[in-house]
Image (cartoon, grey):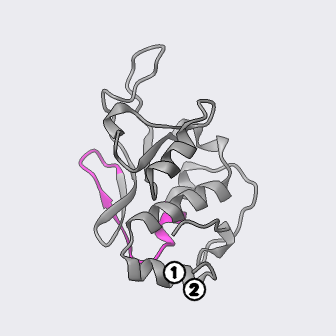
Amino acid sequence: MTAPKPASSLHGVAAKRDQPARVEDIAELASAMPGVAVEIGPAGNAIYQVRKKSFVFFRTPRPDAVDPDTGERYTDVIVFWVESEKDKLALVQDESSPYFTTPHFNGHRSVLLRASRIGEISRDELAELIQDAWLARAPVRLARTWLADHGLG
């Protein structure tokens, strides 16, 4: 179901082409997708869900995501679902990219991104990442409708 989608295709979201992505963009872009609810985790972290399935969430600090130099736990990890292991590998294989994974996520269709590095991607790339995450978790009928409504299905 994955297809390139411009940020301008989101309902009610103004296109901000080529601008660096910001953490604040996540709420705007994820909430613009159909059927999205925001849950708040026990640590006050936002969890974006479609029909009770998370597709983007702010992860609480965990021992598997640490700074390699200091050993300190990352406090700013964002998790995005992806459609397949192939999609995941395409994002994390370049070590210079801001996307990464940890052994905890082996076999899990998701990629990680530190909020402190979100500006390394464009708002358009973030929009596509969020749309693909939503498509990976949305019910088939809802996803097909959204794709058709945006000329992608």
**Residue shown at 46% from the left, 60% from the top:** 133
Left or right: 104, with 145 as reference point: left
Q: Position of residue 130 (x, y in %)?
A: 52, 60
Tell me, yes or no, whether the highlighted magenta stretch contains residue 127: no
Residue that badge 2 annotates:
149
**Residue shown at 46% from the left, 55% from the top:** 82
**Residue shown at 67% from the left, 59% from the top:** 124
Query: How busy is the neighbourhood of tag 2: few (under 14 within 10 Å), some, or many (20 plus)?
Result: few
Q: Amino acid at mark 2?
A: Asp
Residue that badge 1 annotates:
146
Q: Amino acid at mark 1?
A: Trp
Is the Cβ of the residue at disc 1 closer than 8 Å to that at disc 2? yes
Q: Is residue 116 above or below residue 54?
A: above
Q: Position of residue 95 (x, y in %)?
A: 59, 30
State the quadrant of the C terminus.
bottom right
Q: Is residue 73 above or below residue 32?
A: above
Q: Which residues are magenta?
A: 27-45
Measure the C-alpha gap from mark 1 to mark 2: 5 Å
* Mark 1 secondary-structure assignment: helix
Query: How busy is the neighbourhood of tag 1: few (under 14 within 10 Å), some, or many (20 plus)?
Result: some
